[in-house]
């Protein structure tokens, strides 16, 4: 009885699936899927070659500081970093006085101790980076209806995130004539900017890095080309997304070495115990 | 329970003697996973995965309890509280990455455990109850994992909760009220997040309870083995401790190395980047996908693209979505009936040449389904998953009973010991560690 019912249920599901398959196949042949501009012109991120890649990779402190400079002078006008506390900038190699100065240069929300009204005060190391806009409505109103995302986690919120940020920032270009010819409807709209690394090819953000030397780097640092600035700020945003990466990797190496040793011992004791027992 | 030649517990330490006389807990442990449990001597590495699943559950419980101390189950702050764990809690990143990857490894070892059971016929008499309880554990794991994935309240959390509870909305008439009841609202929100957290904390302990029943049921007939021939006498068994504790210790080392490699060097490889974007009810992700361990079932769900209609009338009997939901639940629930569907008296796939071929086909089929489930719902993936889903149901519900009736099994060895000694003759005195390679050659039966 069980087998008869099972047979019928199996026949029903498999039958429906095969019918769906035939139906889908007919539809696929009669109306093949139309190619889209996104499918043909979207590019995967270029490899920037970061110092933190691989199991032994570490952050380059000087690069993180340059990236922080690019963030502060360019991105911070619209993008917040609200998961990051000023105190954690110590990871980048800043000392206490420098961190205090960085925090104090920014206004954070506060309550007036005399009147109880909302006000602002200078930031302290324990504060997090303040929001740029008080809420999403204000953010959208100021940016042609597009909300600039918080960047704290952006390098983990996209596939191949650090390379993605680098490619996006250095990848703005004019829309290829071939694209407009093949897909006239996909012409980049008013207020949008063509970028093959963006999922739907057109994003609201205007190219933020427009010329070499836009940010002035300190002595002994590489030349601030668009490519270099894009790479530096991408490295910085990887750090904001994964500040514990170095501790994670160094712990991991110790853990794996310990486990390898323990596993060899476990294997030897297994062999020893079973030595006289055929199995 | 157990075999007559099982070793008896005799406490050497006076404290243990005192405890054992008043509460025979030491005796219980000794008989369950100690020297008092005789186990077939020929188990291969595929018998490691039960213990590993237990270890994986323990890792989840320990890391989960620590995470719950720092997590806040409130839709307004849940996402930020996870980032607080990642940045400000001492070793919080380790707890969270171990918990997230630990869930994946729990599923990996449980899937291997299940497919071992399928190959060696561990679901057959007299071990049906062990199998049934195992399927219950699997269902509880799926519910727990799904609710855990909602807790970080990222984009995939939110939309996953929306899609999965939306499956219930496909049920005619009562479906939508059921979805609203499950979520505590019309869309995932604070009510849903709170109850999911509560249940996510509860269910692992329910799983632990069912595992105790699973092991209890296992100890009535004793463990199965790669030959599928039952234990005939003391020469066929070895005490669980130290023989299998030692072997499981080695397996555990390998398991922990692989887990550590993921946790420390690729902690986000198995997750979806969208879950680092805070939940936003106004923005639907381009591709909503569950975690990888649900992909085969997700592929079955999406494979149904055609309504069941009465021809030429246009009357829809069952809409495609409901068919998909029915099939997805059926794909797991059919496992409950497996002991009575596969009627072959031979347990082990080693002695079932035809069954063995189809078992490999099933492995391939589930891998294909998994790939399709993770891919976007476009051609050719939908059509491939339709064929693969059709095979999945056909394998369990149609092909297995047919194999059982037409197959001519190879001759079985007279006993476990006979099989072991015959194998030794072929491989010399220093026999290789048992594994799939040596065991798939049924030399013992020749």
Image (tube, rainbow, N blue to C red):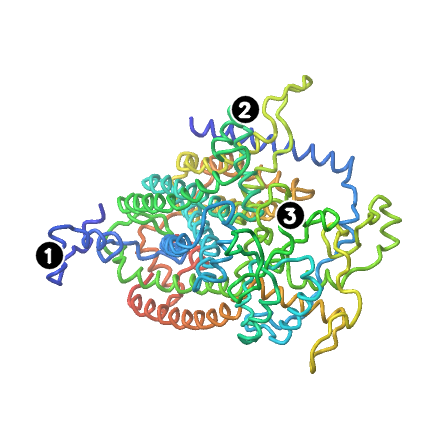
Element assignment for label 3: helix
Question: On the same chain: label 3 and label 2?
Answer: no
Judging from the image, what secondary structure is the residue with disc 1 in? Answer: helix
In percent of width and height, residue A8 lies at: 51, 27
Tag 2 residue: B172
Residue A55 rendering spot, x and y as whole percentages: 55, 70
Rendered-image quadrant of the C terminus of chain B: bottom left
In the foreground, A186 or B395: A186
Residue drawn at point x = 43 percent, y = 64 percent:
B90
- Classify residue A132 by image quadrant: bottom right
Q: Report the residue at 48% width, 56% height from top.
A: B101
Mark 2, secondary structure of its residue: loop
Pointer 3 chain:
A
Query: Left or right: A127 with respect to B214?
Result: right
Q: Residue furthest top?
A: B313
Q: Which quadrant holds the N terminus of chain B?
A: top left
Quarter of the image where one finds residue A16: top right
Q: Estimate the x, y position of residue B325 in percent, counting from the top left.
A: 54, 33
Q: Is residue A46 left or right of residue B24?
A: right
For label 1, the residue is B18
The lab-note entry on whether marks 1 and 2 share a chain reads yes
Of the numbered discs 1 and 2, the one sitting upstream in the chain is 1
Q: Residue tagged by mark 3?
A: A136
Tag 2 subunit: B
**On what subunit does the disc labeled 1 rest?**
B
A262 and B118: which one is in front? Answer: A262
**Which residue is most to the bottom?**
A220
Binning the other alpha carbons within 10 Å of mark 1 as few (below 14), some (14 to 19) or many (20 upward) gives few
Q: Is residue A105 or residue B74 the one in the foreground? A: A105
**Residue at 64% over, 45% down:** B285
- Front-most of residues A232 and B320: A232
């Amino acid at each position: 009885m069980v087998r008869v019912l099972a047979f019928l249920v199996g026949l029903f599901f498999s039958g429906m699936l095969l019918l769906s398959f035939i139906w889908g196949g007919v539809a696929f042949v009669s109306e093949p899927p139309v190619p889209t501009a996104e499918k043909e012109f979207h590019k995967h991120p270029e490899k920037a070659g970061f110092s933190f890649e691989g199991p032994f990779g570490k952050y380059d402190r000087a690069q993180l500081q340059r990236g922080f400079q690019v963030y502060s002078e360019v991105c911070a006008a619209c993008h917040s970093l609200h998961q990051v506390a000023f105190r954690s900038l110590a990871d980048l190699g800043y000392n206490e006085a420098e961190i205090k100065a960085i925090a104090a240069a920014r206004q954070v929300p506060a309550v007036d101790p005399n009147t109880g009204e909302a006000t602002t005060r200078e930031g302290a190391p324990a504060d997090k980076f303040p929001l740029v806009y008080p809420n999403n409505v204000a953010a959208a109103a100021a940016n042609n209806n597009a909300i600039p995302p918080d960047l704290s986690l952006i390098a983990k919120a996209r596939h191949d995130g650090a390379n993605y940020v680098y490619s996006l920032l250095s990848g703005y270009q004019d829309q290829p004539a071939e694209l407009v010819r093949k897909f006239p409807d996909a012409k980049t709209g008013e207020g949008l900017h063509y970028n093959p690394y963006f999922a739907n090819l057109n994003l609201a953000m205007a190219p933020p890095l427009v010329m070499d030397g836009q940010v002035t780097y300190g002595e002994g640092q590489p030349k601030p080309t668009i490519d270099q600035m894009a790479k530096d700020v991408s490295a910085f945003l990887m750090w904001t997304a994964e500040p514990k990466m170095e501790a994670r990797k160094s712990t991991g190496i110790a853990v794996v070495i310990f486990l390898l040793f323990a596993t060899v011992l476990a294997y030897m004791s297994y062999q020893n115990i079973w030595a006289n027992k055929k199995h | 329970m157990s075999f007559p030649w099982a070793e008896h517990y005799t406490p050497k330490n006076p404290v243990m003697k005192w405890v054992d006389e008043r509460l025979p807990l030491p005796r219980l442990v000794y008989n369950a996973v100690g020297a008092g449990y005789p186990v077939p001597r020929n188990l291969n590495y595929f018998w490691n995965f039960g213990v590993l699943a237990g270890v994986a559950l323990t890792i989840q419980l320990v890391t989960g309890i620590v995470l719950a101390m720092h997590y806040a189950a409130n839709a307004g702050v849940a996402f930020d509280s996870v980032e607080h764990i990642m940045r400000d809690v001492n070793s919080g990143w380790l707890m969270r990455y171990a918990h997230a990857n630990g869930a994946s490894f729990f599923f990996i070892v449980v899937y291997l455990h299940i497919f071992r059971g399928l190959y060696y016929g561990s679901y057959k008499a007299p071990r049906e109850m062990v199998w049934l309880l195992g399927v219950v554990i699997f269902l509880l794991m799926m519910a727990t994992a799904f609710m855990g994935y909602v807790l970080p309240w990222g984009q995939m959390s939110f939309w996953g909760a929306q899609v999965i509870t939306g499956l219930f909305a496909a049920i005619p008439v009562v479906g939508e009220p059921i979805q609203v009841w499950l979520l505590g609202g019309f869309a995932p929100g604070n009510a849903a997040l709170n109850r999911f957290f509560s249940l996510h904390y509860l269910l692992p302990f329910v799983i632990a309870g069912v595992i105790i029943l699973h092991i209890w049921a296992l100890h009535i007939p004793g463990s199965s083995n790669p030959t599928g021939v039952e234990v005939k006498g003391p020469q066929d068994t070895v005490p669980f401790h130290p023989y299998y504790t030692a072997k499981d210790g080695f397996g555990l080392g390998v398991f922990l190395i692989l887990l550590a490699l993921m946790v420390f060097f690729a902690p986000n490889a198995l997750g979806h980047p969208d879950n680092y974007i805070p939940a936003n009810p106004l923005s639907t992700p381009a591709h909503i996908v569950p975690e990888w361990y649900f992909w085969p079932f997700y592929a079955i769900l999406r494979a149904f693209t055609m309504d069941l209609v009465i021809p030429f009338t246009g009357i829809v009997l069952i809409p495609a979505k409901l068919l998909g939901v029915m099939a997805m639940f059926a794909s797991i629930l059919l496992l409950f009936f497996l002991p009575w569907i596969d009627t072959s008296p031979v347990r082990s796939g080693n002695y079932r040449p035809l069954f063995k071929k189809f078992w490999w086909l099933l492995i391939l089929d589930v891998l294909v389904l998994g790939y399709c489930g993770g891919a976007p719902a476009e051609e050719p993936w939908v059509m491939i998953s339709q064929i693969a889903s059709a095979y999945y149901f056909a394998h369990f519900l149609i092909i297995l009973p047919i194999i059982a009736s037409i197959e001519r099994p190879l001759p079985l060895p007279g006993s476990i010991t006979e099989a072991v000694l015959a194998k030794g003759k072929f491989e010399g005195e220093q026999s290789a560690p048992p594994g799939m390679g040596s065991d798939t050659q049924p030399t013992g039966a020749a």
